[in-house]
Amino acid sequence: MKSSLKIGKISKIFITHLHGDHVFGLPGLMCTVSQNNQRSEPVEVYGPRGLRNYLRVSLGHSHAELGFSFVVHELELVPEQLPPEKWPIDDSPDAAVHPNEVPGSVIRCDEQQVWTCVSDNSCMVRAVWVQHRVPCFAFVVQEHDRPGRLDVEKLKSLGVPPGPVYGRIKAGETVTLPSGVKVSPEDVLGESLKGLVVAVGGDSSDSSQLLKVAQNADLLVHEATSENANHELCIERGHSTPKMTAELAKMLGVKRLIITHYSHRYRPLSYDLKEGDLSVQVLLSEAQEILGNRVTCAEDLMTFSLTHSESHKD
């Protein structure tokens, strides 16, 4: 609410896992969206099995009435995520359907264990499972490639008048002019603009499944909970160190890495340190030992801009 984002514009929400620090704020967010905007389209929420029940119970028992409808799409789990002997699946009946709820879907993975959550005209959002103490996912947003620039001078030389015809050609249509000349997109369009790829990991001690869907991503946002000296403790609790995260980013060949989800013992970079305080600079420095200046520390209300032109830089 302190950021420049317009909360009423939120149309899709992705939940990595059901630990409290990642999901307790969701019912309140839904209510805040309701107060700020009367939506005509549902808000779609994606996350692991159990998310639908969680929202029904939390919104239902608090008698929260929303000014819009919502849909919950649950990602079906795979055995690797939830060994039955460690955490049995709750097969109890679903809670009562919320008055604002529209029936959602169960999204199953393909043979490569990749879940396709969204596929529309602008982008595709896919998920893979990552290793944590509860079922957890990482999401990858892949923007579709965009048509290249129109060569206006060439269009003029071919006798193509400015106007709607330009749009048809850019959309991939071959146009026949009154003179009988055919103009194909490949004749007058420059190199296509490669779509951006952004991967956002959940809590994880092993996110290697991202190698299936996030190779050469423009940006990876991933946790680095505690410093390298606490490697064994991180593994035990299902988390990553800066070295683990930076090595993953290096394997993926990502152009930028943002580390986040720090232990509370580390103060933000902007914090006025007192004697004995630890700064997230420790985590940043350890990640930079592997990735250099391609690493950024996340901080509340920080804005990170990623442009298409940047995606082509080495």
Image: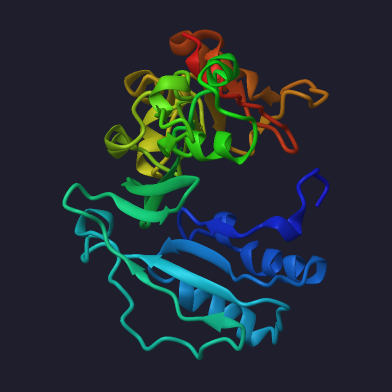
Give the percent coordinates (x, y) of residue 147.
48, 30
What residue is rendered at 16% in x and 52% in y? 111
User: Position of 32 compared to 236: left or right?
Assistant: right
Residue 204, percent across and down?
40, 42
Q: What color scheme is it?
A: rainbow
Q: Is residue 171 above or below residue 157?
A: below
Q: Nearer the viewer, residue 34 or 175?
A: 175
Measuring from the top left, give residue 35's x and y in whole percent: 81, 70
Is any atom of residue 216 visible in this view?
yes
Instruction: In this rendered view, identify the residue nearer to me: 254 or 296.
Output: 254
Q: Is residue 223 visible?
A: no
Taking the image as shown, residue 266 lies to the left or right of residue 216, namely right
Furthest-left residue in this view: 111
Task: Using the image as rendered, state which of residue 312 and residue 235 is in the foreground.
Answer: 312
Where 294 falls versus 196 (above or below)?
A: above
Q: Residue 149 at x, y = what percent?
A: 55, 22
Q: Residue furthest front?
A: 179
Residue at image x 71%, y 70%? 39
Tell me which residue sits at (55%, 27%) in the image: 160
In the displayed structure, does residue 14 sit left or right of residue 187? Answer: right
* 232, above or below 51, in the image: above
Report the label total: 0
